[in-house]
Image (cartoon, rainbow, N blue to C red):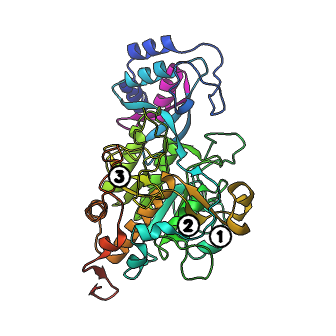
Amino acid sequence: MPSRKRLSLLTILPAAALAAWVAFAPTGNFLAASRSQASGPGDQPGAVPGELIVKYRQPMVAAAERVVNSAVGSKEVSRANDLGVSLVAVAPGVSIEDAAQRYRSLPQVEYAEPNGIVHADMTPNDPLYSRQQWYYDEIGAPKAWDVETGKPYIIVAVLDTGVDSTHPDLKGAIWTNPGEIAGNGVDDDGNGCVDDVNGCNFMRAPASSTACATVPEPNGNIDDDDGHGTFVAGIIAARGNNGIGVIGMAPNVTIMPVKVLDCQGAGTFLEAAEGILYAAKEGANVINISFGSGADSPDSATLEQAINQAHDVYGATLIAAAGNTNDPTQHEVAAPARYPNVIAVSASDHSASGGKAPFTCWGPEVALTAPGVDIVSTVPAKFCARLGCLGGDPYASGSGTSLSTPLVSGAAALLLSSGRVSTPDQVKALLQKTALSLPDAGSKGWDGAGMIQVDKALAGKSYQLGLTALTKN
């Protein structure tokens, strides 16, 4: 009599179906696909060559998955248990489209999709000559700070290239995981990330270049090897009134670094999805996503699933960059900004009238806009030669929807700190209700509800849960 495991395998893969699959399997030695391989037949533009994300409707025994993978001509590279998905590498010479279709033909498979690539949405420019942070006046930040500068218990996750936790203007801003012991090489709190004392690194393989550092498994090495993540973190929470550098939008909140982009600012849908769920589970109130897919990149059910779970189950407010690839024929909002449950942010320019930044993507998914040109923030000192640091200090100027997005994330953190709102949908509704509509300039609706006005969003009565009572501010 067959064992229960054997019966389970036969139930999942009937003999006739398995035979049909094997008939399509490639012959010869299997060579695992890698992110450095050349594009293969049927590879999806904007996706990692030779990689598929596969999700089964119900958990399958490992032996059954191996049989399926072998029949398709693929091997499992890694698993994301929280998402219930497997990353597989398809053998060179096997069409990605054919492999995906073979997976999808099984009733047990919910979906099989390419592992799309996302990119940081920053457009570098020449160093800013003035350190004046002109954009804060445009969005009402100085008046807002009279009401609220942020509470340390409000956590903003920065999904990016990492964060320089030693930067002098981020001192005291970095999240600490109370359940983890530093440097012991153990996942003490069982959250799937080793030594994540200050955040987690999900870059198991480089998305853009083999020169980028990688980790064998998710771990706590959140050092910024590009500069983009530190720039974003400073826009949100650079410390104020400390006599140095710049001030962030919400200068007293906490930053949780989550590394999902490599040393050239590229990552994948799967790593982004894992980072989103990690941040949500670890208590991030706001998740800043200053990256997006290219216009030719596929949508991702995996990434959308993680977003929906973070929003619906954990109550996180997700805010993402609309993208920087606007041109006369192509301005579509990038993924994941275009997904439901995400606040998509476009960028306005440096003009007095608050016009549309020439690079910004826009469309019906855009919820809000914020200044995205000549933004000044923190950078790692080791990148000053490349980034053009101001006066030799670890600060630089840049433009992009990557930089308008953290202004909105900081505004959301101020609202949550004030107690005026408590849910993602309330954050979005209040920011939209109090936004300032900007000139269309031939692109109707490019600014969504308009430019954020943080002082107006914080106006009126607010309530907070204190240690002993409910208090009104």
Task: Identify which residue, 448 or 100, lies in the foreground.
Answer: 448
Task: Identify which residue, 422 or 350, lies in the foreground.
Answer: 350
Residue density around tag 1, few if under 14, some if 14–19, many if 20 or more, within 10 Å? some
**Label 1 element class:** loop
Q: Are marks 1 and 2 in contact (CB under 8 Å)?
A: yes
Nearer to us: label 1 or label 3: 3
Residue ID for mark 1: 167
Write down the region rendered in magenta: 50-74
Residue extending furthest toward the front:
352
Residue 140 percent location from the top left of the image: 39, 72
Residue ID for mark 3: 447
The span from disc 3 to disc 2 (Cα, nearest Å) is: 24 Å
The span from disc 1 to disc 2 (Cα, nearest Å) is: 9 Å
Three-letter code for the amino acid on which mark 3 is drawn: Asp
Three-letter code for the amino acid on which mark 1 is drawn: His
Q: Is residue 354 above or below residue 171?
A: above
Residue ID for mark 2: 234
* Quadrant of the image containing the N terminus: top left
Task: Identify which residue, 374 or 199, lies in the foreground.
Answer: 374
The span from disc 1 to disc 3 (Cα, nearest Å) is: 33 Å
Q: Residue at x 71, y 64 (%)?
A: 381
Residue density around tag 2, few if under 14, some if 14–19, many if 20 or more, within 10 Å? many
Q: Quadrant of residue 32?
A: top right
Residue 144 percent location from the top left of the image: 38, 76
Residue 365 percent location from the top left of the image: 33, 46
